[in-house]
Image (tube, grey):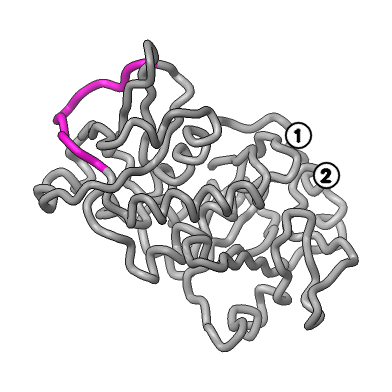
Amino acid sequence: MHRCPFPVCAFCMGVIFFFAVSTGVFAAAPGDNQQEGGKTDRRGDSTGQARAAPPAEMLSAGHATQVELANPALASTAAKRELLIYLVRCALPENITLSTQHGAERFTFKGSMGLAPRWLYEAMTPSEERWVSACLLAHVNYFGRSVPISLRANPPVVPTLAVSDGEQQDFSIFEGGFFGNLFQPSPVAYTCRGDRTPDQARNPIFQARVCTHETGSSTADGMPITPCHFLVTGRCEDTASFTVDGIHYTEVILIYLRPNTPPGAGIP
C-alpha cells in the first residue's frame, strides 16, 4: 500500500530527466547488510556510470544490500529526492536500499515492488519501463494526500502484486487501471475505469482519489482527460481499453481502495 504526493506533470518531466541522465545505470559501491542511515524521510535520484553486473545474490530477495548513488547531485534537491523515492520503490526489490550524502544529511531510498530489479546496473527493457510507469502513475494523488491503495496485476508478474484474501476483502473498491510509458521522449499516461456498484461510486474515498475521474475536457481525438492529465481509455473490463495508438499494453497496475477511508489516513 503506497501513496504519492506530487503533481503528475512535474513528475513526468522529472522521470524524463532522470532517464536521460542515467539510462538506467546509476549505482556504485554496494555495501552488504548495512542499516539505513540519515533522515527517516527517504528521498533521492538516479545516476549514470557504467558498472559491472552485480552479483546474483545482491538481487535475491533475502540478501539485504545498501548501494551508494554514483552521482550525489541527482539527490541534490527535495524535488529530486521526492521523485527518487517512488522510482526506487517501484523499480527495485525490498532488499535493496540506495543511499547518498548531501551536505550534512544522509538520505536513503528503499526498494519495494521490484518491477525492474536490475535497473541498478542495466537500462530498463521497454516492458520494465511500462511496468515502472504504471506503478508510478498508480501512486499519483492529485491532492497530495496519503491514501492507502492495493496494487495488483493480472497475472501478478512479481510477488508484490499478489494479494492475500484479507487484502482483497479489505480493499474491495476497484478504482481502475494505470498504464503508459513515462520514460519515452513523449510520455503517455493512461487510465481505465474500474467496475463498481453505485454505492461504491459514492464512497467518500473518491473525494481523495480522482485520477480516474473525467473532467469534461478531452483531447482532439476525443479521449477524456482526468484532473491528473491521464487519458481515459474506457472500462478496465474491456480489453480494447488497453490498446492505444496501435500499442497494446499488458503492463497494467490495477488499484483497489478501502471503503470509507478518511482522506489523509494513509501511510508514507
Q: Is residue 29 magenta?
A: yes
Quadrant of the snapshot with the N terminus: top right
Q: Which residues are magenta?
A: 27-38
Q: With respect to residue 87, does 231 lie above or below? A: below
Q: Which residue is mark 1?
A: 263
Q: Which residue is mark 2?
A: 207
Residue visible at 9% across and 48% down? 55
Q: CA distance from mark 2 to mark 1?
A: 8 Å
Q: Are marks 2 and 1 in contact (CB under 8 Å)?
A: yes
Identify the residue at the far top of this view: 104
Q: In the image, 101: left or right of 235?
A: left
Where does residue 57 sit, x and y in percent of width and height?
A: 12, 46
Q: With respect to residue 154, does 96 lie above or below? A: above
Under circle 1, the secondary element is: loop
Q: In the image, 54: left or right of 224?
A: left
Q: What amino acid type should be assigned to the residue bearing mark 2? A: Gln
